[in-house]
Image: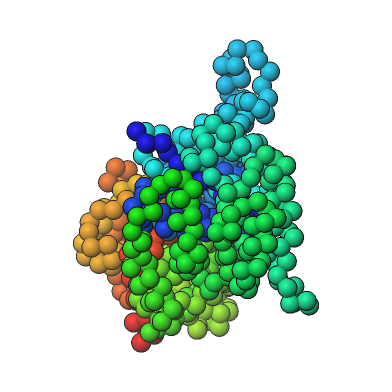
Amino acid sequence: MKDVKYIFITGGVTSSLGKGTLAASLAKLLQARGYSVTIQKLDPYINVDPGTLNPYEHGECYVTLDGAETDLDLGHYERFLNVPTGKVNNVTTGKIYQTVIEKERKGDYLGKTVQIIPHITDEIKRRIKLVSAGNKFEIVLTEIGGTVGDIESLPYIEAVRQLKWELGAQNCIVIHLTLVPYLAATGESKTKPTQHSVKTLLEEGIQPDILVLRTERNLNAGIKRKVALFCNVEEKAVVESVNVSTIYEVPIKMLDEKLDQTVLTKLGLPIGEAPDLTNWREFLKRLKNPKHSIKIGLVGKYVELPDAYKSISESLIHSGSTNECKINIDYIQSEDINETNMNERLGNLDGILVAPGFGARGIDGKIAAAKYARENNVPFLGICLGMQCAVIEFARNVLNLTGAHSTEIDHKTAYPVIDLMEEQKSVTDKGGTMRLGGYKCVISKNSKSYAAYGKTETVERHRHRYEFNDKYLDQFRDNGMIPVGINPDSGLVEIMELTDHKWFVGVQFHPEYSSTVINPHPLFVQFIKACINRKG
């Protein structure tokens, strides 16, 4: 058996430099060279997972096929690699401490004093190696969240230091991503922040093998040489990452900088033939040279932070490229929409997407948006709560069930068309207790969804507690809102469609989690096509 190779990616100077995008881009290049690759995220916060975090705090909560609520960076990993991630791909400090404390309570440490070193660091190392158990992957990339110097990330940095010592230089390398700011007043790019960041990393026991310099402007050879000299790395191991118009250009830029070749050389692996990125380049070509342009209204209550809907916005980009169409997203705060202003606010849109969410805030605006789309024949895609809002609107205004609602919002409603799932009624904990992960869906042949998928069965990811109430199934079906997707095991409704509408689809699941660059989700592709047709 060959040794698994480990690549750790740390960040310095400031947060939000794009460690996740860098990790995904490098992994894509290594994958294109024929290596089996996966990526893991280590998050320093004490929450067990982001499932209980407000999207304003942490952006989108991404759900894996095996039912883990994870960091949004895992979405980048999947969209770039076209390979599913799972529970082992996202580790938090909360999970680490939870495991260690449970072991201590069981007496697993035989009465020893439990400490950060070795117990916490040992558990971190175990989790890092777990992702490659059974030698499923030749290379594991691990992104360490936060910024070097943060007190929260110290145990992770120490665990990496130990692994480098244990595994050897050719089996474990560290890439450090930093910022080289440009000072317009002097016309200079400054390397001092990078030097200080590397010094901090050195104080914590790690010499980086490769430096990636995030910059607004191209760096000259003199700056790279200066950084290499003062940070004690090879000159060819100083890589420029200049700002680009889309994150999907980053793999091409890293290929131009020969980052993948430098990594493989340091890991003692054959470089082989140049990676085949034909499909990737075709995607970028279509993305940058659209033949159409449409405006999609994304109606949600967290729109002030677009990262709260990251997978949705990326899915629109994927499907836009497939349709050779530029997608202009209008992020619409659902609290600002009502029946008196919906014509004015939604009238200039080519399509309406009502986003998922939880709670009562902004739900009336989502219901109004669904009504506008239904009455004006505007292509509509409702996701999770978005589908439920479409059901509530139809019940009120077509079935004349006055006050129909979801029991999540109004537990006394006379017409609970959306109700709590039976297995959820005894649940009191919030974290990790929803219907999570992949579930089957059987699709009716005479439906727009079947036209999109081209097959009668699929598996989609879920994250919800409430569902369509089967007691009202016949009333909906008799009046033109048809359940065209059903879970074969539970009988739960997965997809609802309007029969007398150009394109109106509501899904209980989250198709955005499954869309990738190479395989855009078929529902998004058909939604965009319907929007183009309506405009054309």
The residue that appears at 67% across and 56% down in the rendered structure is 229
The residue that appears at 44% across and 70% down in the rendered structure is 317
Question: Residue reaching furthest top?
Answer: 110
Give the answer, above or below, for where 268 lies relative to 242.
above
Viewer can see residue 58 = no
Q: Quadrant of residue 195?
A: bottom right
Residue nearest the viewer, comparing 289 with 64: 289
Where is residue 316 drawn, in percent x and y?
Answer: 44, 69
Viewer can see residue 222 = yes
Residue nearest the viewer, comparing 279 with 402: 279
Q: Is residue 515 left or right of residue 499?
A: right
Q: Is residue 300 left or right of residue 68?
A: right
The residue that appears at 35% across and 76% down in the rendered structure is 323
Q: How is the image coloured?
A: rainbow
Where is residue 399 drawn, in percent x and y?
Answer: 39, 65
Where is residue 479 drawn, in percent x and y?
Answer: 32, 66
The residue that appears at 62% across and 71% down in the rendered structure is 220
Q: Which quadrant is home to the C terminus?
A: bottom left
Q: Quadrant of residue 451?
A: bottom left
Q: Which quadrant is home to the N terminus?
A: top left
Number of residue marks = 0
Residue nearest the viewer, comparing 160 with 500: 160
Q: Is residue 36 left or right of residue 15?
A: left
Give the answer, above or below, for where 446 lies relative to 129.
below
Question: Residue reaching furthest right?
Answer: 185
Where is residue 165 drawn, in percent x and y?
Answer: 57, 33
Question: Residue reaching furthest bottom?
Answer: 536
